Amino acid sequence: MEKEERGRRRRRKDGKRRRRGEGEEKVAEVDLPCDRDLGPILLIRLQKEPYSCFPQSSWYCTTAQVTSPQGEVFHFPCYQWLEGYSTLSIREGTGDYIVLFKCSLYFFEQCKFSHPSDQPIHPSFIPMQHRMSPKSPLPPSLPSFGVLLPTQMLHVTFLILPISLFEAKMKGFFYKPYSWEKLEDIRKIFWFYHTPVSEFVFKHWKEDAFFGYQFLNGINPIKIQKCTHIPENFPVTQEMVAAALGRSTTLEKELKKGTIYLVDYKILENIPTVFLNNHQQYIAAPLCLLHQKPSGEVLPLAIQQPGPQSPIFLPTDEEWLWTLAKTWVRNSEFHTHEVIAHLLRSHLMSEVFSVATLRNLPMCHPLYKLLIPHLRYSIHINVLARTFLISPGGTFDKAIATGRQGLAVLLQRATDDLTYTQLCLPDDIEARGVGGLLQYYYRDDGLKIWEAIKSFVSGIVGLYYKSDLAVQGDAELQAWVAEIFDKGFLSKETSGVPSTISSIPELVKYLTMLIFTCSAYHAAVNGGQFEMGAFMPNLPSSMRKPPPQVKAPLRPWPTPVYSLPLLQKPLGYYDEEHFVEEAPKRLISGFQECLRRITSAIDSRNQTLRLPYTYLYPPNIENSTTI
């Protein structure tokens, strides 16, 4: 037997933990004499025992390999820590599932090491998360995707924080309790770190064209929808928008042509807010009407704040009054982006998928092997978020208008509204009626990546499931899907999320959705947070005055807030080998080649753009939700 182990101690002599991938690798070779042929090796056990007077240590095993006297090699992927003096059972790495694997030893091990059913410790109206105290460490025995190691934590603390918190402290603006005197002061905070995009935002944030651009290619590109008729509660008339549309057309004509779009923040109505620095904070639920010109520019036509007396704000209004109306929309963008687009649809969904995968799919299951790189670190990063961002006294309580209480209300509403259609990009594009939008790079790049993932997934599924009956008969798969429906979508049939999978096409779509959500979608809504939000007037987290009920300019500049842009393993590149057969390895190589072609196409397009769209640039997309 050859056991390949990265026999790294969890701690060095100086007390610092080692990161996986660091330190000396050790390969231990062991000869095991046997007087008869054992046949195919199905399962092995690694046992760590006390040795002499040496202290107990933790060891990380990547993989074990067994070579028979006939030269046949059996692979046993592990990628787990062995804590204390324990025994670890590992299935042979050839992908299979319970219908294919009828070995009584397997069933014994499955029962012995199955995870107990956890009860939720959070409100019943949000997706189930991992059951643990926010301050308790994650168990190291989780497979490698579960835990961020200390050196990775240092990356978060000492690489990311200097960009925002430390720099803000140096400039004397940290938790600034009073209003800004001039816009230049806000820009000065980030003199130490800026990007071409953040500079572009500072220069163009007031422009209508950039305001409209962000609905398509900003960090919340999933709100805009086609408008076929003007809502009754948004009585925009031709006279109001005639100057913005020009003499050659009318509002009615543009509605029929399909060039009028709407962004509706109704979900924010009556969300509770908090006091920050002894000031009541405010939130609004505006409506924003947009028009796409033949050139491709998307421009705002009208904005209305909620309330029976609220006027409709227009581009022809006084400059700063119109800017204020747009700033209220951008404030609504902040709340819907952070809580719905980012927290719920990315982080909480990733954690639901992670926990269900841990509890229902054994490591040798082909779907486990397919999915595990895209679930890596999702649980841990969410534990950090619950500890520092949405905990009592955390960032949401200190710098966000809703605080934690308002966040909970908004999260409940968004969970009630979440559908399978929204999570499947092609269906979402069709449902929102935005297939004809020009210069919608989130859609264009996202659909290419969706198809690349779908092709890869289809190949993997085809290797292990030869018929719809095979899908229906995979008890582990069905239990996994059922738990996601039950715990993640709270058994709501109105969500459209399947509770069972009955065919190969359904399975391919479901797996594509999962991988896309954890990788490309997260990149789209996460990657630009600093660039779009560093200059706070473009994405304010809080407003100190209520929405205007008359057309009189106000001054609502926000206090500074910061977002922490971490670890990156690009989509399609896996540093752990869970598939040991050649066929899936060839499919992985094909997936990587497809992503390279998409990268090349985006490179060519971006050279022609004033503001390149890079949030779905494949080298920038992480395999999993890691920040």
Image: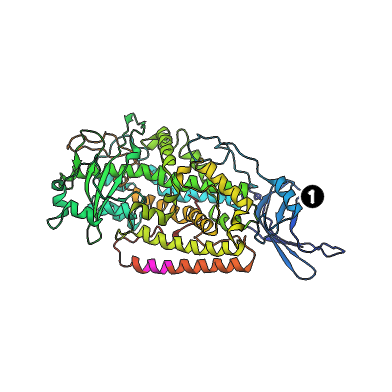
Residue to which mark 1 is pinned: 51
Residue 176, image x and y in percent? 34, 37
Q: Predominant secondary structure in magenta? A: helix
| Vertical order, 38 against 472 (above or below) | below
Q: Which of the 4 image quadrants contains residue 344?
A: top left
> Which residue appears farthest toward the bottom when viewing the image?
70
Return the residue nearer the eye: 500 or 159. 500
Q: Give the range drawn in magenta.
A: 598-603
Residue 21 visible (yes or no): no
Return the residue nearer the eye: 200 or 243. 243
The quarter of the image holding the N terminus is: bottom right
Residue 315, image x and y in percent? 18, 48
Residue 237 visible (yes or no): yes
Residue 598, image x and y in percent? 42, 67
Q: How is the image coloured?
A: rainbow
> Which residue appears farthest toward the front when viewing the image?
469
Magenta stretch: residue 305 in it?
no
Residue type (three-letter) at the residue carrying disc 1: Tyr
| Vertical order, 28 against 113 (above or below) | below
**Number of other residues with Cα within 10 Å of mark 1, as a class: few under 14, some 14 to 19, many 20 or more:** few
The residue that appears at 60% across and 64% down in the rendered structure is 463
* Residue 21 horizontal side relative to residue 256, left or right: right
Total residue callouts: 1
The residue that appears at 32% across and 33% down in the rendered structure is 281
> Which residue appears farthest toward the right when viewing the image?
35
Residue 246, image x and y in percent? 14, 55
Return the residue nearer the eye: 568 or 349. 349
| Vertical order, 598 against 342 (above or below) | below
The residue that appears at 70% across and 46% down in the rendered structure is 113
Label 1: state its secondary structure: loop
Q: Which of the 4 image quadrants contains residue 576?
A: bottom right
